[in-house]
Amino acid sequence: MSAVFDRSLLRELAAAGLGAARRRARLLALGAGAVVLLLLLVSSYRSAAGREAGTFRVRRGMLEPTVPLVGALVPARSETYGAAVPGIELKILWLVEEGTLVAPGDRLIEFDPGPFQKEFETARARAQELTGETEGARLAVDALRLKSTADFREKDGNAALSEQELSALVNTTAPLSAQESANEIAMRERALDEAQTKLTGLEPFVGEGYVSQEEFRAAQARRDQAEADLRLARAKHSALVHQTTPDSIRRKSQEAETSRLDASGSRERARIELAQAQAAASVSAARLDEANRLVAEAQRKIAACTVTAKAPGLAVHSETFDKSGERRKIRVGDSVWGGTTVVTLPDLSAMLVEGRVPESEIHLLSPDEPVRVALDAFPALALEGRLRSIGSVGSSERNDARSFPVTIALTQADSRFRPGMVSRCTVVAKPLRDVLFVPVDAVRSDEAGQYVLVASWLGRTSSRRVQTGVTTSQFVEVTQGLREGDTVRLVAP
């Protein structure tokens, strides 16, 4: 019985122990399930907190800054054409149709040349008149030059002849005349000596009767004649040497000097007359040049009334104001002043996009960065470009935000492109790798700097100071203050 009791007791005790063990196991299982459930709830809460509106979990990865902008197509090169003659109003007689693709040399505008036609006729008539006058003045100069040359030769010949005669008189004629006169004296002296000798020889024989008185008187007469001839020869010689020859030399010297002065004076007068004639010819030539210049100017103005294209492009008419003050396109029959642009020829072979970028994103841009371009007119056409330039001077927008002009050069060309087409561009800046980033709306600012609101796993938020780096249109790089996986709250819209 005791054994049975013992066995039954053992069975009861075992059953009781097994029940207690089962109860402990169930309690342990329930506790573990509660912990797991609590962990799942916390994890679910944190996941939900990271996914709920107004929060963002801090990420690490590659940040690709892109800068969107909206611009308009403009030609890289453009030529303008209009009235090239300043200071006068010209009427348009013909105008190329707007939208026409023109080639170099094609006619663009035809202005009324009437205002210049009369100017041309007047200038041409004046030029013809002055041509005759100038030719006459030139011939007068040539004739005067020839006459002066002949006069110079005559005057110079006279002067040279006078010099030669003076030289001959001084060196030949005068000395020979003096020598002849001296010889005459010597001959008369010998004749006198002979006559005196004969007379002396006859004188002793006169008394003796050997020589007649008549013969003696004849001898005396011959002696007396010889004396008279000698006195005359001496007088002539004295007059020749002391008066006639010096007088002749003086006269010839005066004549030679007069000839020289006459030649010199004639040369000076001819020089003055020739200079005057040449001056008159120069004045006539200058007047003719001016008349020809006016003719050429009038011809240039008439030629300028026909305007042709220098380069290819698309014809675009300029705008003007009508009498009512409304803007409209220039058309045939309008009158425009010189210097006014009538037609613009944008070159469609090279197009640019001009737009503006906010000041907050200008630091992301660098020249030659790639750009994706889409045109509203051709939405299926994907275009590429390069950032060509960034303006250095910004301007204020209506909301007081500042923006800077940028220019994008398209790498493709299409004859369908037109200036003014809306272009939606995305500038792809240099990517940043392995950086922490949060949305731009997560970063707040106060007097102390920048901060974010970090959400804890229990839903509480706390302020944390951060330092930021590169900012894109959506995200901002965080360099200090956050860790990957932190949850930040966004600024409520």
Image (cartoon, rainbow, N blue to C red):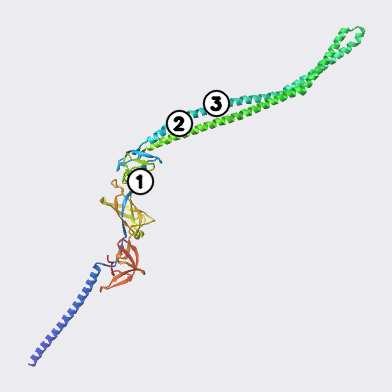
- Counting the numbered discs, the total is 3
Closer to us: 88 or 111: 88
Above or below for 84 versus 223: below
Residue 11 spot, x, y in % from top left? 10, 87
Q: 179 or 114, which lies in front?
A: 114
- Say which quarter of the image contains residue 41: bottom left
Q: Which residue is mark 1?
A: 78
Work out which quarter of the rendered image holds the C terminus and state it: bottom left
Taking 84 as reference, is 326 left or right?
A: left
Residue wearing tag 2: 126
**Residue denoted by label 3:** 143
Which residue shows up at 54% across the image and 32% down it? 279
Of the two numbered discs 3 and 1 on the same chain, state the one appearing first in sequence: 1
Q: In which quarter of the view is residue 203 placed? A: top right
Outermost residue on the right side: it is: 208
Q: Position of residue 412 (x, y in %)?
A: 31, 49
Question: What residue do we see at 81% from left, 15% from top?
Answer: 229
The residue mark sitting in front, 2 or 1, is: 2
Which amino acid type is marked by label 2? Arg
Q: Nearer the viewer, mark 3 or mark 1?
A: 3
Answer whether residue 171 is visible to the viewer in this image: no
Q: Residues within 10 Å of mark 3 (few under 14, many from 20)?
A: few
Q: Residues within 10 Å of mark 2 (few under 14, many from 20)?
A: some
